[in-house]
Amino acid sequence: MSIGVRPSKNKNIEKEINKINTNEMILILNPNSQGGNTGKNWISTYSKVKEFLPKNHRIIFTKKTNDGIFDTRRLLRKGYENIVAIGGDGTINEIANGFFNLQPQNRNIENLKKFSFDPKLKVVNPNGVLYIIPSGSRNVLARSFGLKHQGVQALKRIKQMKRRKMDAILAVITDKDSPSLIHKRIILNAAEIGVGAEIIDRSKKVRSKIKSRFVSTVASIVATLPAYNSNKCDIVIDGHKRISSNMTMGIIANGRFLGGGFKAAPRAKFSDGLLDLIILKNSGSFKMLDKLIELKGTSTYKLEEDILYYQASEVKFFPRERNVTVTVSVDGEPIGMLPAIFKSYHDALTIKTETTSSRI
């Protein structure tokens, strides 16, 4: 059985959860992913995959931003263990965040400089398992994992998925509208800082008016790149290495790929306890495109004067100019701005996916 094979606008999630047997597998679906096609085609999809799912399963549809976080957290607190994320990178990120106890906090920049991470992430349910079913337009996380199947084909293989651990990167990011408020957010694949995040932010705003992802992305690149300038930042790596550098774009990577197919972090692995840090230092009009194209993943960037590359456990970013907004996005979703800090937690999340390459 499922909780509404088709999305419902009136059902109360708490009532739905209370009706569920905790032994059931819960599928959390974003009907708006893949340009709305996930929801539009769900009746057909469900008819094709129902026989491949465990007998005891239910389906919950998200309705708005952050539903994936709160619905997942409520389910895990009530004792449910098997949570299936069906959607794009943003949806899967939200559901993964629901596995952890993360609360926003009020802090100023000086306190953030002294911020120290807890030694371990606090999980909601230590027996919780996240099943990853990519069903978005880009599915960058799936590419970094090396997953071969998505959507229907991935759901058909859900009983054969392999259990494994993966690192989670915790980001502490300043709110754009209320700089005294910070957000804690788990990163599965990558965070982008600066021009990449700004392009993502503009693209989403354009897409609210123009539904084409290609058109909105191209329009945002054209609007952003020519005028974007590097920002002077202080960067602290693992608490002792300090760098002051211009930064056009920063990348905090758990996986190898970014949107657009850029293989930004060729040495990244999902279970090595490290985050990969890439800093593109200088920009000038469309010169930035050349630098992005150079992210082929064929070297350690040692010969690139304008690209810095490190592997670390923790990194902090503080802009020199406080009146400049430097946007931060997480797994393809704009979250906030600098200052921000990031820490890798080794094997913090239990997941199930189809068989992947050993690079995980």
Image (cartoon, rainbow, N blue to C red):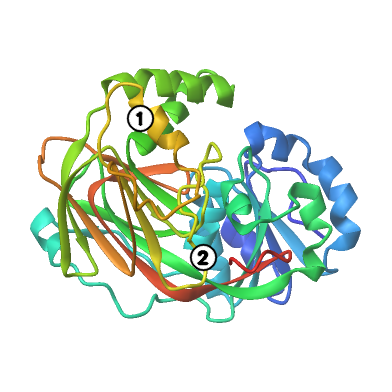
Q: Position of residue 259 (x, y in %)?
A: 52, 40
Whether residue 332 is situated above or below residue 242 in the rendered picture: above
Residue at (89%, 49%) from the top-left corner?
48
Q: Position of residue 91 (x, y in %)?
A: 56, 49
Which mark is on residue 269? 2
Which amino acid does the dot numbered 2 rest on? Lys
Counting residues from the start of the chain, the first of labels 1 and 2 encountered is 2
Mark 1 nearby-residue class (10 Å; few <14, some 14–19, many ≥20): many
Which amino acid does the dot numbered 1 rest on? Met
Residue at (80%, 49%) from the top-left corner?
152
Quarter location, residue 283 = top left
Classify the position of the N terminus by image quarter. Answer: bottom right
Whether residue 118 is situated above or below residue 183 in the rendered picture: below
Q: CA distance from mark 1 to mark 2?
A: 26 Å
Circle 1 sits on which residue?
Answer: 288
Instruction: Count the marks.
Output: 2
Q: In what element is the residue under mark 2?
A: loop
Mark 2 nearby-residue class (10 Å; few <14, some 14–19, many ≥20): many
